[in-house]
Image (cartoon, rainbow, N blue to C red):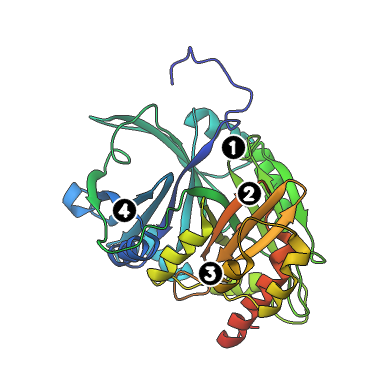
Amino acid sequence: MSTTTPARSNPLARIDWDYIEFYVGNAKQAAHYYMSAFGFEQVAYAGPETGVKNRCSYVLAQNKLRFVLTASLLPDDEIARHVLLHGDGVKDVAILVEDARAAYEMAIAGGARSVLAPTESRDEHGRIVKATIATYGDTVHSFVQRDGYTGAFMPGFIAERRSIAGAKAPQLQFVDHCVGNVGWGEMDAWGDFYARVFGFSQLVSFDDNDISTEYTALKSKVMTDPRHQVKFPINEPAEGKKKSQIEEYLDFYRGAGVQHIAIRTDDIVATIDALKANGVEFLDTPESYYEMLEDRVGAIDEALDVLRARRILVDRDDQGYMLQIFTKPLQDRPTVFFEIIQRKGSLSFGKGNFKALFVSIEKEQAKRGTL
Ligand code: FE2
């Protein structure tokens, strides 16, 4: 960065999602799953064929979504150890910034631990500056400064386009929010972390009175950037009669990590139909939910039987309503999953759906013997 760039008071005031990187056991097969089931297209690749000796990375894209699937080629490196401990999971929730050095310096000044100091890389398509800090568990945030970079992803990657013929296109648009699960009593500290390190503010919080069933409970607070572009809800388990779903996650993931990624769609009914045709499995919703729905949310554009047939959830706040549904876990361990969300005015997170959702999750937990 040249010294003539004017200092900004908050280098994280104008940010967006850049990519989400998963560390997985077999990136080739994982890439095939996300392409065939979720309609992604592969756009870039790094591996031995491109001069990278220790790993393979597949970059998948769909509208404004970008996922990177990375697997180690070694028996014992940082990636292999991450997969050994956590199973397949999210490593890096990367943030697009205007000035990666300034973002990194603000984060470090706020108490973040450095993983990668600002590093510039170049190829014939331009340059990228990237810096990385640690967050909860073994999860990290990279700050990515692109400066009009025109390559497929980053220096070190080659453009390689591939898609699965016959996979239905669900038209997933962009990340709405990305949720972290942290340990008992740690939610407030991580909320403070995002306030200090990112300059985020708290959008909303829920306690165990909001988010509990007869058996299990959790607490949650949502941290957001000033433009509400990047939202990080943070959950911790709460005491209930039985094991919290957050505790189950922490047991299987062996610590804190990303619980779910909420993905926006403009047409949830068409999206869910496409995903189901591709074989994606969703959590069920109790039938009783739909008997009470009209009274709870009032008039909506969608026909009730259309939503009921797809088990789509609806919630309303004073600004509008939203529709959402949750996939089953995306890998063997009951850890990370997706939410599909369509917003019609509402900025909320589906508080009115928590109970129905958790009854459904508890049924799945009971099957696993972890309730
Ligand atoms: Fe969510």
Residue marked by disc 4: 41
Q: Amino acid at mark 1?
A: Ala
Residue beneath disc 2? 344
Reply above or below: 304 against 129: below
Question: Disc 3 designates what residue?
Answer: 335
The image shows residue 145 at horizontal and vertical percentages of: 43, 32
Mark 4 CB lies closer than 8 A to ligand 1: no
Which residue is denoted by mark 1 in the rendering? 107
Badge 1 vs badge 4, beta-carbon distance below 8 Å: no
Q: Which mark is residue 58?
A: none
Q: Earlier in the sequence, mark 3 or mark 4?
A: 4
Which sits in the foreground, 205 or 131? 205
Q: CA distance from mark 4 to mark 2?
A: 28 Å
Q: Nearer the viewer, mark 2 or mark 3?
A: 2
Tell which circle, 1 or 3, labels the residue nearer the N-terminal end.
Answer: 1
Front label number (3 vs 4): 4
Compute the Cα span from label 1 to label 4. Answer: 33 Å
Residue at (47% x, 14% y) in the render: 3
Q: Nearer the viewer, residue 358 or 30?
A: 358
**Please, what secondary structure does the residue beneath circle 4 have?**
strand
Could you classify mark 4 by the number of other residues whose Cα lies within 10 Å: few (under 14), some (14-19), or many (20 or more)?
Answer: many
In this rendering, position of residue 100 left or right of residue 180? left
Task: Please report contact status of discs 4 and 2: CB closer than 8 Å, yes or no.
Answer: no
Q: Nearer the viewer, mark 1 or mark 2?
A: 2
Residue type at mark 3 is Thr
Residue 216 at x, y = what percent? Answer: 73, 76
Quarter of the image where one finds residue 239: bottom right
Q: Position of residue 246 (x, y in %)?
A: 65, 69
